[in-house]
Image: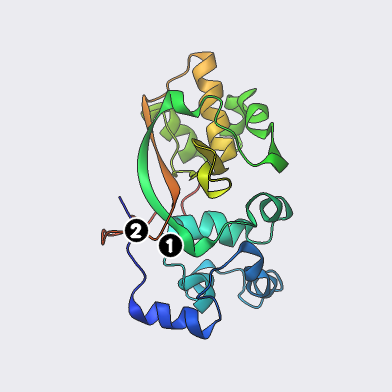
Amino acid sequence: MDFPHAPPDVLGVKDELGLAGGMKLGDLSPLMASCRAGGLNHDYDRFRIDPVAASLQWPDDVLEQFLFDFGDNAAFLRDYGSIDLHEMRWRLETIPAADFNGMPTGESDAGCIESFAENPVHWVKVRPPEVGRHWEEHGTWLRPPLLIDRGLLDPSTSGLQVLEGRTRVGVLRGRLREGLHVASHHQAWVGHPGAAPGTENRPNTAGQTC
């Protein structure tokens, strides 16, 4: 499931904002400062329609999990600050469970997935009850995590990296090791290099818990 090209009016907004040449995570600093100061009342619905955020034309679920939650996170700025956000396309993909074993995350948080994997039952119990029910009934997470093509960070590399949803992926690994119910395949948002083709509708899982 691909995400559509930005329509002409959005492209015009990008020009007005001086973002036609690209947008980096650090360019969101004024918006994030306003949000954290309460200027946006920590309200995602207001964040998503801000011209800077809206110019990306990303799926709501990705925008919320990535930029609204971590747009000013120091580790994310270090690990992902070089990516041109306008040159990412997002697709909801189905990934084999085995592919998540050994999948890395950002260098600043190296090891955190394995830490979560050591006690998958605990990390599900501290979430709302519907999260545990979904794991038991379906063997997967309630909300798709975010993965990126590692070529976005270094064109000479390949494979996928966990951007957000480190706890979810850790729970999956831990449940696999402990012989608990795990589905054979799992949905995840995957960010790829390039402008987003297609005109498909976006599934709206924004606001769901993990």
Relative horizontal placement of residue 110, taking residue 167 as reference (left or right): right
Q: Secondary structure at mark 2?
A: loop
The amino acid on which the numbered mark 2 sits, given as a three-letter code, is Phe
Q: Secondary structure at mark 1?
A: loop
Q: Position of residue 161 (x, y in %)?
A: 54, 39
**If you read the primary sequence from the N terminus, does the residue marked by circle 2 or circle 1 appear first?**
2
Which class describes the residues within 10 Å of circle 1: few (<14), some (14-19), or many (20+)?
many
All told, the count of numbered labels is 2
User: 120 or 198: which is nearer to us?
Assistant: 198
User: 191 or 61: which is nearer to us?
Assistant: 191
Q: Which residue is mark 1?
A: 58
Q: Tell me if residue 160 comes above or below residue 59 in the rendering.
A: above
Inspect this view and state whether residue 210 appears. no
Which class describes the residues within 10 Å of circle 2: few (<14), some (14-19), or many (20+)?
many
Q: Tell me if residue 141 comes above or below residue 120 in the rendering.
A: below
The residue at 46%/51% (across/down) is 208
Inspect this view and state whether residue 200 appears. yes
Q: Position of residue 122 (x, y in %)?
A: 62, 28
Q: As drawn, which residue projects farthest toward the bottom? A: 16
Q: Which residue is mark 2?
A: 3
Q: Residue 76: which numbered mark, if any?
A: none
Q: Position of residue 137 (x, y in %)?
A: 37, 29
The residue at 59%/38% (across/down) is 166
Q: Tell me if residue 23 comes above or below residue 14 in the rendering.
A: above
The residue at 41%/67% (across/down) is 57
The amino acid on which the numbered mark 1 sits, given as a three-letter code, is Trp
Residues at badges 2 and 1 in contact (C-beta under 8 Å)? yes
Coloration mode: rainbow
Q: Position of residue 189 (x, y in %)?
A: 43, 46
The residue at 67%/49% (across/down) is 79
